[in-house]
Image (cartoon, rainbow, N blue to C red):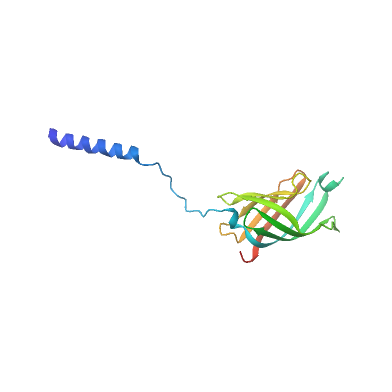
Amino acid sequence: MKRKALWIVGIGVLGSVAMLTVEQGFADDGAPKCTLATLKGRYLFAASGVGFPPVFGTTEQSVGNAAGYHVFNGNGSGKDYVTFTLNGIDQHVPSPNDFTYTLKSDCTGTYSLVPLGQGLPTFDIFVSPNGDEMTSINTDPGNAASYTPSRRVWPK
């Protein structure tokens, strides 16, 4: 009986030591991961929003509309081609406009027109894991605009 008890204790000790040497792991939730290259190609967009003073140099609440397309290069940079109206008046935005973007592995990120700090809009972005669609929301004070999902319309 003592011999059987020693075997059980020995196996328990070996099992415990083996568990201590194994690297701790976490279950993979199976979710696809995003990289900068996930966003590559041309994406159509359109949105309406409300601006509150002093956004865009206004002194009263304004309605803004934008439509165009983004061209993501897959490396954190790209160009925008856009028409923007404020209270129904075309603002004659020169196109193309350069932008930068970030994208974390959870497919969330940021998007900013450059040069930064020039009163140009910034956005939080949310991207489908395969990169076929994205949506965004303006994060600038005084701007209330979000974009319905933009679909990639030109190949990666």
Q: Residue at position x 76%, y 53% from top?
A: 49
Q: Residue at position x 25%, y 37% from top?
A: 12
Query: Which image quadrant is residue 37 in?
Result: bottom right
Q: Residue at position x 77%, y 58% from top?
A: 66
Q: Horizontal placement of 60 versus 17: left or right?
A: right
Query: Residue 60 in the image: x percent, y percent?
Result: 86, 46
Return the residue found at the far bottom. Answer: 154
Q: Residue at position x 23%, y 39% from top?
A: 11
Query: Residue 113 in the image: x percent, y percent?
Result: 73, 51
Q: Horizontal placement of 60 versus 46: left or right?
A: right
Q: Horizontal placement of 104 versus 54: left or right?
A: left
Quadrant occupied by the N terminus: top left
Query: Residue 143 in the image: x percent, y percent?
Result: 76, 47
Q: How many numbered marks are there?
A: 0
Residues 12 and 21: in front is: 21
Query: Would you place residue 134 above or below residue 124 in this image?
Result: below
Residues 79 and 44: in front is: 79
Quadrant occupied by the C terminus: bottom right
Return the residue found at the far top. Answer: 2
Residues 9 and 103: in front is: 103
Query: Residue 150 in the image: x percent, y percent?
Result: 66, 60
Q: Horizontal placement of 155 versus 54: left or right?
A: left
